[in-house]
Image (spheres, rainbow, N blue to C red):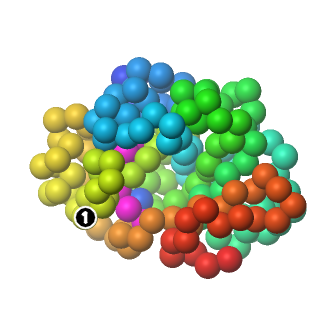
Amino acid sequence: MILKIGEILGFETDTVWGLGCLPNDSAAVDKIYEIKGRDRSKPLILMSNSLSALLPYVKNMPDYAKTLIDKHFPGALTLIFEKTELTPDFITSGKNTVGIRVPNHNGFQKLCLEIEGNVLATTSLNYSNEPPVADFEEAKEKFGTNATLIKPKNPIHTGVSSTVVLCTGKTPVILRQGSVWI
């Protein structure tokens, strides 16, 4: 599969279903905000099958973040760092930070191998202020006309969002507690 400019994907991860597009596609990012009814002040995150694909988007990674990565990547952990110039402002809502994650999900990892650059700009697959979709059938019912849905061969997500940790200071700050405890 070659992800086209303007295309939005719905896919399962190890935590919840996601909605994503190419990170350099401002029109597709706009569509994600519209589809979800998402507040434009809430940034998207970048996800990939490998940390190496995400590193060009971040800078100033403290040692404690490297320890978290070694322990929890791939997995249900989103880390927020200062962004580089490569990270578009339309993904980060104009903030100087970006979240990154490497899900522990074979289907997602295979999907990334088929995407140029192996990186997606993502968010959860849900309408704002509602829970993420539970399965493919709900994803199809709610979002099938707005996104290309990738049907999982063996559904295995937990339904619990990732833990989100801010890594821009001297110590990590948990912004959302998910299934990973640090």
Q: Quadrant of the N terminus?
A: top left
Q: Residue at x 29, y 67 (%)?
A: 155
Image location of residue 48, percent across then percent down = 56, 48
Q: Residue at x 75, y 42 (%)?
A: 82
Q: Quadrant of the C terminus?
A: bottom right
Q: Is residue 164 above or below residue 117?
A: below
Image location of residue 2, percent across then percent down = 40, 30
Q: Nearer the viewer, residue 48 or 131?
A: 131
Q: Nearer the viewer, residue 11 or 111?
A: 11
Magenta stretch: includes residue 26: no
Q: Nearer the viewer, residue 161 or 4?
A: 161
Image location of residue 36, percent across then percent down = 31, 41
Look at the numbered disc 1 and give the secondary structure of its residue. loop
**Residue bounds of the magenta highlight:** 14-20
Q: Is residue 143 above or below residue 80?
A: above
* Amino acid carrying mark 1 in the image: Ala
Image location of residue 147, percent across then percent down = 26, 37
Q: Residue at x 34, y 28 (%)?
A: 31
Residue 134 appears in the figure: yes
Residue behind mark 1: 134
Number of numbered callouts drawn: 1
Q: Quadrant of residue 175?
A: bottom right
Query: Looking at the image, which residue sits at the far bottom?
Result: 181
